[in-house]
Amino acid sequence: MTLTRDPARRRLLLKLKKYSYLIAMLPLALPFLLLKAGEATGWVNLFAWGVPVVVFGIIPLLDWIFGQDALNPDEQADVPHMNSERFYQVMTLGWVVAFAALLVWSLQVLASGVFSIPGAVGWVFSVGIVGGLGINVAHELIHKDSKLETRAGGLLLSLVCYGGFKVEHLRGHHVHVSTPEDASSSRYNQSLYEFLPQAYTRNFMNAWCLEAEKLKRKGHSPLSWRNELIWWYGISALALIACTIAYGWLGAAFFLGQSFIAFSLLEVVNYLEHYGLHRRKLENGRYERTGPEHSWNSNYFLTNVFLFHLQRHSDHHAFAKRRYQVLRHHEVAPQLPAGYAAMIVLALVPPLWKKVMNPRVEAYYKGEEHQLA
């Protein structure tokens, strides 16, 4: 798909794209489908590892086959109607309910003893990747004004033990993105394995600091019931206790294991979204306003609908409350050479990542090489 100025053709393409978002529900069904395939073939332990194969193997290949999509909705003719359609909201809210059910079912399957130890590890890894995709859904929800959506997003984050993301992302990352103050923005020539430890610790601590500052400004104690982090992490603790009571150490290991995989996947995505990009510092000491040029974009169609348009990250940072279905492609935004699924695999191998991405960052700042420091 490409940009089109023909209104009838554009509306047709947007209609087709609307129902293409149903692909984003596929991760919720993958563990069930893979388990059935494993049982049918007798390779249940092999198929337990199926989700990473699909997400990081098959989807990048299909991205290459389906190609890119630079279609933007018309601001007057399309956006108001698309924003009002309940279809898009029902999908993200339904994701939360379905993921909670998936967690319960997945733990029951694990506890049934159907897997060997390697198969059980693969099962936890697969469910964790689905949880990481769920954080993307939570990301969409927490940016909205509706209490139902923001609370649903917080609940989904609690199911992967990353409730602090709701606070830090909105009040930290979106304020300091692409500056040295942001732990979620990776630096030029920084490897993924240098980035991850600081992302885990700084983002967790920063969420508590931001919430404490907010409550103090309002005259409340950070340890009061008004601290939303206590609620979100309290839900995580209750889920952990429930899993442990129901299935002992296995339940605890499953819940914590899938959570770790989920929020690690989030931080890997953070790493690639802003790698090497910086907001310029102005003469008054402040940073320039966040624009589309401060995030890496990718227009590969399949991964975009699979991730609720997360790859149009530039428009999201420039206009954070825009709903996923109306996010736009910007020509000024720097473009990744592949979809997020393929780029995540590349980031896991730092020499290859730097070989591919460093020349792109250097070309972007040609004539302003001091920005790379």
Image: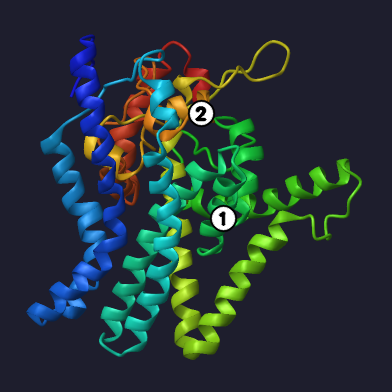
Q: Residue at x 27, y 68 (%)?
A: 31
Residue 275 in view, yes or no: no
Q: Is residue 162 above or below residue 328?
A: below
Of the residues shown, which amino acid type is indicated by label 1?
A: Tyr
The residue at 26%/79% (across/down) is 119
Front residue of this view, candidates 143 and 174:
143
At horizontal 80% and vertical 60% (from top left) the residue drawn is 225
Q: Secondary structure at mark 1?
A: helix
Which mark is first along the chain, 2 or 1?
1
Using a 10 Å C-alpha cutoff, classify the residue at mark 1 as few (fewer than 14 neighbours), some (14 to 19) or many (20 or more): some
Residue 181: percent from left, percent from top:
64, 36
Asked which quadrant contains residue 230, the reply is bottom right
Q: Position of residue 102 (x, y in %)?
A: 37, 69
Quadrant location of the N terminus?
top left
- Asked which quadrant contains residue 146, the reply is top right
Q: Determine the CA span between mark 1 and mark 2.
A: 21 Å
Residue designated by label 1? 200
Name the front one of labels 1 and 2.
2
- Which residue in the protein does label 2 denote? 317
Compared with residue 76, is residue 42 higher up or lower down, i.e. above or below? below
Task: Report the front residue among 363 and 21.
Answer: 21
**Horizontal arrangement in the rendering, residue 123 relative to residue 223 (left or right):** left
Above/below status of 106 relative to 276 = below
**Residue 130 at least partly seen:** yes
Name the side, left or right, on which 27 lies relative to 147: left
